[in-house]
């Protein structure tokens, strides 16, 4: 009997629903998520969610969520750190591309977030992808330009306006990172 190879794995969403713990599923391959994020990661996520939420007070079509399943297909389910989604009707998981996804990098998730999820979010036409680097207190913002992401820049003390969203929002990175600067 030969060794099991990754390409031999072909789990589906039905399998995923039965697993204990925190997982993601990419192309049928299960990927365990790290233990709960460190306080800095959680603090930055809370600041971003708070900032978005305050701007959505009068928006009835959009919501900001943390750690929600995004079911891309039967063999791919991701759990972004933060999403801004509009007009989503499914109560169990996201079924369509969010307008903004934010991933906060950790050492264990860097390759997954910078490579695999980057490619998936781009292919799924997620409007904006923000990758936050908590150790550096900076973020990279990517905007979907046709079929590919165009890097909008590195942000540490600047603001960015997400102009192509149903409810206009922005992030002031100086405010997001303020509590964490020494």
Image (cartoon, rainbow, N blue to C red):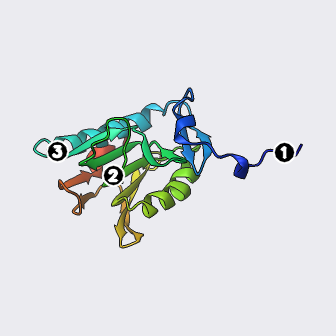
Question: Which image quadrant for residue 1?
Answer: top right
Q: Which is in the foreground here, disc 1 or disc 3?
A: 1
Name the N-terminal-most of marks 1 and 3.
Answer: 1
Asked if residue 47 can be seen in this view, the reply is: yes
Residue 32 spot, x, y in % from top left: 60, 37
**Residue indicated by mark 2:** 98
Residue at the spot 72% in from the left edge and 49% down from the top edge: 8
Left or right: where 178 falls relative to 134: left
* Relative horizontal placement of residue 141, taking residue 159 as reference (left or right): right
Is residue 1 toward the left or the right of residue 150 in the image? right
For label 2, the crowd category at 10 Å Cα-Cα, with few meaning under 14, some 14 to 19 and many 20 or more, is: many
User: Of label 1 and label 2, which has the lower sequence position?
Assistant: 1
Kindly indicate whether the residue at mark 3 contacts the one at mark 1 (C-beta within 8 angstroms): no
Outermost residue toward the left in this view:
58
Where does the image place residue 160, in percent across and percent down from the top left?
26, 59
Distance from disc 1 to disc 3, alpha carbons, whole Å, reads: 51 Å
Would you call the spot at circle 1 few (<14 residues within 10 Å), some (14-19), or many (20 or more)? few
């Amino acid at each position: 009997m030969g060794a099991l190879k990754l390409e031999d794995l072909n789990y589906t969403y039905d399998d995923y629903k039965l697993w204990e713990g925190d997982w993601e599923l990419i192309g049928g391959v299960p990927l365990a998520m790290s233990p709960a994020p460190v306080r800095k990661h959680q603090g930055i996520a809370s600041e971003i969610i708070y900032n978005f939420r305050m701007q959505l007070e009068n928006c009835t079509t959009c919501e900001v969520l943390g750690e929600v399943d995004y079911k891309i297909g039967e063999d791919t389910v991701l759990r972004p750190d933060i999403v801004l989604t509009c007009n989503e009707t499914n109560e169990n998981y996201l079924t369509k591309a969010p307008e903004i996804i934010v991933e906060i990098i950790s050492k264990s998730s860097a390759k997954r977030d910078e490579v695999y999820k980057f490619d998936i979010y781009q292919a799924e036409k997620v409007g904006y992808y923000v990758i936050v680097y908590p150790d550096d207190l900076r973020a990279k913002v990517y905007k979907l330009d046709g079929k590919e992401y165009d890097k909008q820049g590195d942000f540490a003390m600047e603001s960015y306006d997400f102009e192509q969203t149903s409810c206009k929002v922005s992030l002031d990175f100086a405010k997001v990172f303020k509590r964490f600067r020494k």
